[in-house]
């Protein structure tokens, strides 16, 4: 029988160690770690996220129980205080840079989005992670509330987070959106919170398309009307010019599309600067924006980003970026092995077999005489193709 290492070791092999070492030098503190290295910290954080450990003590104790496997993971016995100090003091910018490297590694293997056009498709949104004000006073954004906001750009090719910025709860979404540089010809889908006519004008001038729901108080002038197929539940397809005070400073013709949901009867009005795609395709693009909400739900339910093992701002950011790297590595395993199961089923199986000495092919291979155990797992319907 051929020798194989643990499943956890095989998962960690997806991390490019040469890039890891170079990032460690770029984001170092100037003092070389004697025993507990950056790699030790990353492996311990990743173990905590995959196995959903409840606390810092729980994570360390669970790793120490598997002492015989730590050597092959590049680990040594971990002291709880050392792990805590590393999360609090070592710059979280290292994990943010590692997150960017991991995304670039996953992107070539990710399946294309489900639409026929070739433009890159992104969704942009933000979610709030609530924190206890007495424990995290630095995260205060209201009189009696604390939290951090995760500003995310989701790539619809594989539904991968292409960008993530962690800010305080007061920072508005549009401020982060204006700082982003998107590839020319891409399509970005946002909700009404991103309504900013100056930003719309800059996107039009940069050759970037956007899809957004129109606000009720928007004022406009109709320039042209086109016929629509009412069988597709379309109500209007117009070319308009916004007439508001701020919109008149950078006037650009926009496309206004009306759609009535056949199930709920609710009427939606979409604005876009794309005049080439079909009206129904624009409506379907905005409907696919719901995937970013499912992404937020998934990481909050399956990774440790609602309970933190450190109280400082640096420790919180480190834990969140480590969770996103774990998410990307799980997606990379799914794309590389062409698994058809959801990420929810994947992480549940890894939790039970993380230190089993099996190849990835053996772990996910189903025998004909065994029931399909994956069907019994309650899955979140993430649309991974």
Image (tube, rainbow, N blue to C red):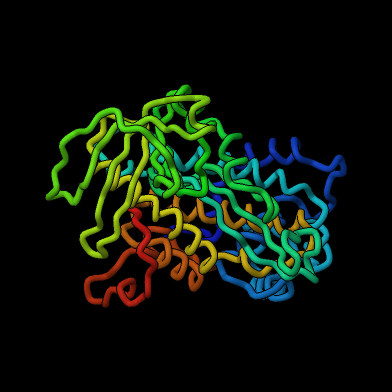
Residue plotted at (29% across, 46% down): 283
Residue 176 versus residue 309 in the image, above or below: above
Residue plotted at (19% across, 33% down): 226
- The answer to whether any part of residue 336 appears in the image is no
Horizontally, residue 312 falls left or right of residue 355, namely: right
Residue 180 versus residue 300 in the image, above or below: above
Q: Position of residue 353 (x, y in %)?
A: 48, 70
Q: How many marks?
A: 0
| Figure quadrant of the N terminus | bottom left
Horizontally, residue 186 falls left or right of residue 147, namely: left
Residue plotted at (24% across, 38% down): 237
- In this orientation, which residue lies closer to the viewer: 259 or 33? 259
Residue 176 versus residue 357 in the image, above or below: above
Q: Position of residue 240 (x, y in %)?
A: 34, 32
Horizontally, residue 41 falls left or right of residue 46, namely: right
- The answer to whether any part of residue 32 appears in the image is yes
């Amino acid at each position: 029988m051929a020798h194989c290492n643990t499943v956890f070791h095989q998962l960690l092999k997806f991390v490019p160690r040469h890039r890891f070492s170079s990032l460690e030098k770029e984001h170092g503190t100037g003092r070389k770690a004697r025993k507990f290295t950056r790699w030790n910290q990353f492996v311990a954080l990743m173990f905590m996220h995959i196995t959903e450990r409840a606390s810092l003590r729980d994570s360390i104790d669970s790793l120490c129980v598997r002492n015989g496997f730590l050597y092959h993971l590049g680990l040594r016995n971990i002291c709880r205080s050392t792990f805590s100090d590393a999360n609090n003091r070592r710059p979280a910018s290292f994990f943010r840079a590692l997150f960017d490297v991991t995304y670039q590694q996953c992107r070539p293997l990710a399946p294309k989005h489900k639409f026929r056009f070739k433009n890159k498709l992104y969704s942009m949104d933000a979610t709030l992670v609530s924190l206890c004000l007495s424990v995290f006073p630095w995260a205060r954004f209201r009189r009696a509330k604390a939290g951090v906001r995760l500003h995310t750009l989701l790539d619809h090719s594989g539904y991968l987070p292409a960008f993530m910025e962690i800010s305080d709860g007061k920072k508005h979404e549009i401020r982060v959106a204006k700082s982003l540089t998107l590839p020319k010809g891409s399509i970005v889908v946002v909700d009404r919170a991103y309504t900013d006519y100056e930003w719309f004008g800059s996107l039009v001038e940069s050759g970037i398309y956007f899809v957004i729901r129109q606000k009720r108080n928007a004022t406009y002038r109709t320039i042209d009307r086109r016929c629509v197929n009412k069988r597709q539940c379309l109500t209007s397809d117009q070319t308009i010019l916004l007439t508001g005070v701020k919109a008149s400073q950078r006037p650009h013709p926009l496309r206004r599309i009306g759609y009535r949901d056949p199930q709920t009867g609710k009427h939606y009005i979409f604005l876009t600067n794309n005049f080439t795609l079909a009206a129904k395709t624009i409506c379907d693009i905005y409907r696919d924006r719901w995937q970013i909400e499912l992404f937020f739900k998934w990481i909050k339910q399956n990774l440790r980003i609602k309970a933190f093992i450190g109280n400082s701002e640096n420790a919180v950011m480190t834990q969140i970026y480590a969770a996103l790297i774990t998410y990307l590595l799980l997606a990379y395993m799914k794309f590389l092995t062409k698994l058809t199961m959801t990420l929810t089923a994947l992480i549940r199986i890894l939790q039970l077999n993380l230190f089993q000495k099996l190849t990835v092919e053996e772990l996910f291979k189903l025998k004909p005489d065994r029931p399909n155990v994956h069907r019994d797992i309650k899955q979140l319907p993430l649309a991974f193709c």
